[in-house]
Every structure is written in C-alpha cells, then in structure tokens.
Amino acid sequence: MSEYVLEMDNIVKEFPGVRALKGVQLHVRPGTVHALMGENGAGKSTLMKCLIGIYHRTAGSIKLKGQEVDFQSPNEALHHGISMIHQELSPVPERTVSQNVWLGREPYKNCHLDHRKMRQDTVSLFQEMDLHIDPDEKMGNLTVAQMQMVEICKAVSYHPDVMVLDEPTSSLTEGEVTHLFDIIRKLKSQGCALIYISHKMDEIFQICDEMTTLRDGEYVGHDFAAETNVDALITRMVGREVSNMFPKTECEIGETVFRIEGLTSGKQVKNVSFEVRKGEILGLAGLVGAGRTETVETVFGIRRRDAGKIFKDGQEIEIKTPEDAIRNRLALLTEDRRGNGIVGIRSITENTVLAHLKAYGFPLNHKKMREDTEHYVAAMNTKTPSIEQPIMYLSGGNQQKVLIGRWLLTDPDVLIVDEPTRGIDVGAKSEIHSLITRLAGEGKAIIMISSELPEVMGMSDRIIAMYEGAVSGEVVRGAPEWNSEYIMALCHGQNG
Amino acid sequence: MNTKSMKKVLGQNSIWLVLLAMCLALTLSTKTFLTAQNFMNILTTESIIGIIAVGVMWCILSKGIDLSPGSVVALTSCISASLAQQFVYAGRLFPNLPDLPVIVAVLAALAVGTLIGLINGALIAYTKIPAFIATLGTQLIARALAQLYTNAYPIPELKPEFKNIAQYNLFGVIPMVVVIFVIFAIVSGYMLTQTRFGSSIYAIGGNDQAARVAGINVEKNLIKVYTWCAFCAATGGILLAARSGAGNSSVGLNYELDAIAAATVGGTSHTGGVCRISGVIAGILILGVLKNGMMLLKISPYLQQVFKGMIIIAAVVFDMRKNAKKN
C-alpha cells in the first residue's frame, strides 16, 4: 500500500467559460494534518467539492487507500470514509443534538426509533471527544462553536479516514480553538488524515504538518511545516505577475468627497474610518469575512449603524435607509447579485430604472425608460436579444453590466462596488475594469471591494486592508509597501 | 405585424384564447349562452369578486396573500347598511340615528375597511409575520366584529338611493355594479403599469432585498398594497349590501378564495413579481363563464366545484411549465 491515504492527481474542473482547476495534485498521509493554502478563488473549495462528489471533475484521478474512486454524492463519500465540515453549517435547529447527530441513520428497535440507544451513543461519542454538551438540548440553542463541535463529532462517528475542515475556526473564540485543536490531535493520533483549509497563518503553523498551495486553480507547491515559514508561504500564495488586465490610467485626484468616521455595526464592523477623493479608486482588501461588505452595507443604510459619522462634501449626512444614501448621490453595487441585486423575473428595462424611478414622473414615462435602458445597454456593450428580456436569462457578466447601468443612471458622486467581477468571465471582467477606471477619470469617487489581490492592486490608487471588522492598514500606490506580500500580511492581521 | 411579434402577443394572451374557446363551446352546446342578457348576468354576478380580485392580485404580486377580504365584505356591508336604513323603518339598528345622507354610509364603510387594510399591511411590513397568518387573524376578527355589530341579525329596509349604488342601470342596461368593477379594473391596471407604486411592487415581489437596496421603501409600499386590497373589499361590501338590499354578517364567505383563484388563473404568480391586469380580468371571466355555462348545461353544483378546482390547478401547472420551458 502506498504511503498516502489520499492521492489526487491532475484534477481538472471546468465550468462553462472558466477553468477552475487546471491539473491540481494533493497527496495526504494518514495521521497528519495537511493544510490547503491559497487566496480566495484559488480553487481550494472547488478541489474539495470534487473530492466529496458535490462537483464532478472534468479529468484527473482520485485514489483513496490506493483504490480509484469517483463519488457521485457527499453521502457516498461519507460512507467511504471521507467527511467534510463545511464553513456554513446546516443543522436542523428545532431538533435535539442527538437527533442531529444520527439524522438519516437513526437506530431502530423492532419497528420504532431506539431513542435510548441514540442518546447513549451520543453520550459516549461526546465523552470520547471530551465534549460537554447535553444531547437533549435543542440544536438551535447551541452557540456556533458548539454546533461545529457537534458537527465534528458527527463526522467522527462515521470513523473517517479523511476529514476536511473548511475554515473551522472562523467563528470560534481562542479557548474554543484550543479545544478544537485537542480534538484534531486526538483524531490524528488515531490515524485519521485531516485536510485543513484556513487563512489564519498562526493556526496553520500550530496544527499542520504539511501544506499544499494552490494559485489560480494551479498547484504551486508542497511544503513541510518544519521547513518553511509564514513569509515564504505568503510569497508562494501570491507570487505571480500582476497581469495587464488592469488598464490603470493616472487621473487627477481632487478633494475629499466622502468620509466615514468610527463606523461601527454589531461585531462585524469595528470603528472603521476612511475617506475617498474625487477621481480616486480606493480598494478595500481583506479576506472573506473581514467585514468589508458589512462596512459598505452600513454606509448604505442596509445594516444598522451603531456608531460613527458619515460625511459627504464636508457636511455630515444622515443615512438610515438606502433611499437616504441614493438621495445623497451614493451608489452600491452589491456583492450578492442574485440575493439583492437583480430582480430576476423582471425585464432589463425594469431592472435598469429601478433605483431611478422618481425621474419618470406620473404617469411613468415608458418611452424615456426604454431610451435610458437602450443607452446603457449600448454603452456597456450588454449582450441581450431585447431589453424586454427577463434579466435572469442573461449571463452573470451581462447582469452585472445592467446593474452598473442602474447605478450610473442615478448619476452618483460615490460609487461603491463590492466584488464587481466575481463569477464573471474574463472578457466581461476586463470591460468592467476599464469602465471603473473611466468613471474615476470622469471624477467619480470609487470604493472597490475585491478579494482578489491582483485586482485590487491593479485598480486602486490606495488600499485599505481590513481584518476581523477593523482597518488593519493603509498603503498608497507607489509607496515602498505597495507589494502583494505586505498587503496580504495586512489582510491576515499581521503588521507587515 | 410579423409572425414573431404575433406569436408573442398570442403567447402573452393565451388565456384569452382559452376564454374564447370556452365561449365558443358553450355557444354551440346551448341556446341561451350567446345572448346579451346572459353576458350581463355573468358580469353582474362576477363584479364583486372581480373588484376583490383586482385588489388581492396586488398582495399576490408582492409575494403575499390576503385572506381577510371576505370578512371585510361582511363587516362593511353591515356598517354601510346600518347607516343607510330607511328613516321611517321602525326596526333600525340605531333607532335614534338622524337621517344621514347616503355618502356618510359609504365613507364610513370605506374608512373601516381601509383601516383593516392598514392593520394588515403594518403587521406584515413591520412584524414580518407571514401575510397568511396576519390576514387569517384579521379575517376572524373582522367577521366577528360584523357579528358583534349586528348581533348576527340582517339589516334590511335600505334607502332606495343606497340600493341604487349597485342596482341603477346606466343607459338603462348596464348595472352600476358592473360599471364600478370596470372602473376598479382600470384604476388597478393603471396603477400597475403607469405609476412608481406599481413598478415598486413588481420589484418587491420579484426580489424585496434588491428593491430595498435600490432605494424603495418596502414597508411603506406593502402597507399601501394591503390598504388598497381592503379598500377594494370594502367597496365590494357596500355593493353587496346595495345589491341585496340588506347588510348581513354572514355574507362574503370565501370571497377571498374566489378572488385569489381568479387572479391565479389569470397568471398572477404566487412566487411574486408577475401579474398582468388583462390576465386577471380573463381569469375572472373564465371562472364566471365556467359557472354560468355549467348552470346552463345543468351540471350538478357539486360537480361544478370539481371542474373549478381542476381549472385552477391546470392553469397554474400550465403557467409553470411555460416558464420552465423558457429556462
């Protein structure tokens, strides 16, 4: 038998128009913790989804204990000894802890559920894992950390050979992380292999034995934790040429048009301050969950503001709802296009004029609506058979162009774009990049959130990095710190 | 007109073809269907449900529902009747009431109905409870209020001027209740396509989060929707009292379900964001013609309900398959 419990070789995964994995390898030894590293969008989650059968790989081989496997569903993978703890948990909140653990495989005695066995098995499982949770408690009453522990115990009850943990510590406190690591060490000593996905460098060096790094869907290297360090790893993760996909042109930067001071909202946004000037593109860099989306949502009146002030053209303004924000000439292209961007079932025209309905009078001037829509469809080079087409039938890139048109129609002074090119094919991506640059050239102030470091560095005049809800640093284009290693370190909460 | 746009027009109005086919079949199989009198009968019978339907379609469009209109009809029929009883009638509900002009009765009933709509809207918009629950609650409450108000006795002997609101024949042939239905259909359709309010509700029904980000005040708009729906129902209540010559706390039972059925058959989507006034009117007429036709064909009333149920289900299945094909 080979020294690896899991061998993934030359894995290729293609989506329509995108090659998400371009021949990736991952070899995991039993009884080790193997970190899977890479920036957002490097292909880590895609690789794991190919492993457990959520996605079906386009090419490549997966061997589990030397046997070639091809799982059709996560359930099949589970029964062959591979379990995955997802970042987003999916418990059944109204059922008890033990009902959740044995969901779908409840023990029977004669022809009825064996509640006693279910409970006893849960108790002994928890004892083994040193977990102090009442099996009869409702799942919904647990903290997120507790739910995660229960989820891990549930995975353990399948006696897996390989367990995948995707960002397991993102919602845990330090004490809880220590407990999680104890459990991981215990599993390791029992010979289980763990694949650990995390952005937290210090944790990775605490718990992991080996690491495999991906970049842009490609395998870039394998290291032993003992033989590498944080800096080397960050260089591996980002070490690439910033392509000329970003047509950055220098443009005149004027006076400050927009400023926030001490913005706070719940636990996600902590005392955030920044300003943006006329003609400037301000990049907000950070990892997924760093609080960037929450910050701009608070600015825009979508999220409740607990503290902080907002200034526009030197005057303090009051924003309680998106309506207030639009009146003050702000615009927000949201991150979640389907969730709060498009109205899928309605036409391109209706989607274009949505934020600007006040301009069409009473009765509504349909002719002007159509003219405005035609104008932006042409200006954005949006591909659609007709402007009466429901927007849901367009591709992601074309939907995004319609939404940008929606906001340009309101003639904003400050345009906030949140992950403007996520899930968009390469062609539309560079069109959107040049558009944003052109808008800055026309004197609009632009705030751009992007989790892709090359994008945010290619486009911005200045970058603010955020980490865990707070600003962790600022770098101006041209400064000596303007390099991907330094900015990546800021995004990881390290001071360069 | 080229074939492509012809196809589009036909596709959007296929429901009118269904109606036409039904009328054709009934014309061939009965002697009495194709007469002016019978058509006026259908319209007169369906007008009140129709007025409720052009109100409740807004709730469905916004991804909600309103179950209270039937009870609002009962309550407003009692309120308007109680204020419009003949002065000389000894058994008046309020014997000491002065001789009020008819308009007072109408306005009082409209005000009470509208208030119930405001409550529905505020509950749904601000407490975020499902529309089904909120309006189920007000359905029970409004019906009970009507019974408490009248002690569950009918309120007869209404003034001729009041009865004329529904019974007067315009140009000697068109009953007022039909005229008012047409007015409500026009107003509702106009609001839907020609006002910001209509555009906002399409967006809210399609994706309320997107509407919110685009600066639309979702809560305020939802309140307007439920208020308009209840206003329509209150109008229906007044017309019912005027037409039948009495207020009664037991009338209007299941009217909301007939109205919801008509709007649904007319292509209003319960997943929100889709509604056309022409479709809803066709839906009202289809259910009306079906009822009328089966009566003329002397089909058992129990069997009639079976057909009605089948039509409603078939309409929605057809609609969903049409949309699925586009995907």
Image: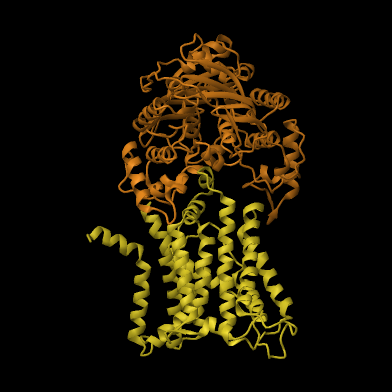
Residue A382: quadrant of the picture:
top left
- Which residue is depicted at the point 53% across and 70% down? B52
Residue B159: quadrant of the picture:
bottom right
Can residue A66 be seen in this snapshot?
Answer: no
In the rendered image, residue A408, in percent from the top left (x then y), is placed at 42, 37
Colour assigned to chain A in the rendering is: orange
State the residue in front, A47 or A330: A330
Horizontal arrangement in the rendering, residue B193 relative to residue A340 (left or right)? left
Horizontal arrangement in the rendering, residue A277 relative to residue A198 (left or right)? left
Tag count: 0
Classify the position of the C terminus of chain A by image quarter.
top right
State the residue in front, B175 or B5: B175
- Which residue is depicted at the point 73% across and 35% down? A126
Which residue is most to the left? B2
- Which residue is depicted at the point 45% across and 45% down? A356
State the residue in front, A186 or A36: A36
Colour scheme shown: by chain
- Which residue is depicted at the point 44% across and 55% down? A362
Colour assigned to chain B in the rendering is: yellow
- A323 relative to B22, above or below: above
Can residue A46 be seen in this snapshot?
Answer: yes
Horizontal arrangement in the rendering, residue A266 relative to residue B203 (left or right)? right
- A376 relative to B272, above or below: above
In the rendered image, residue A231, in percent from the top left (x then y), is placed at 54, 11
In the rendered image, residue B284, in percent from the top left (x then y), is placed at 46, 73
In the rendered image, residue A118, in percent from the top left (x then y), is placed at 72, 45
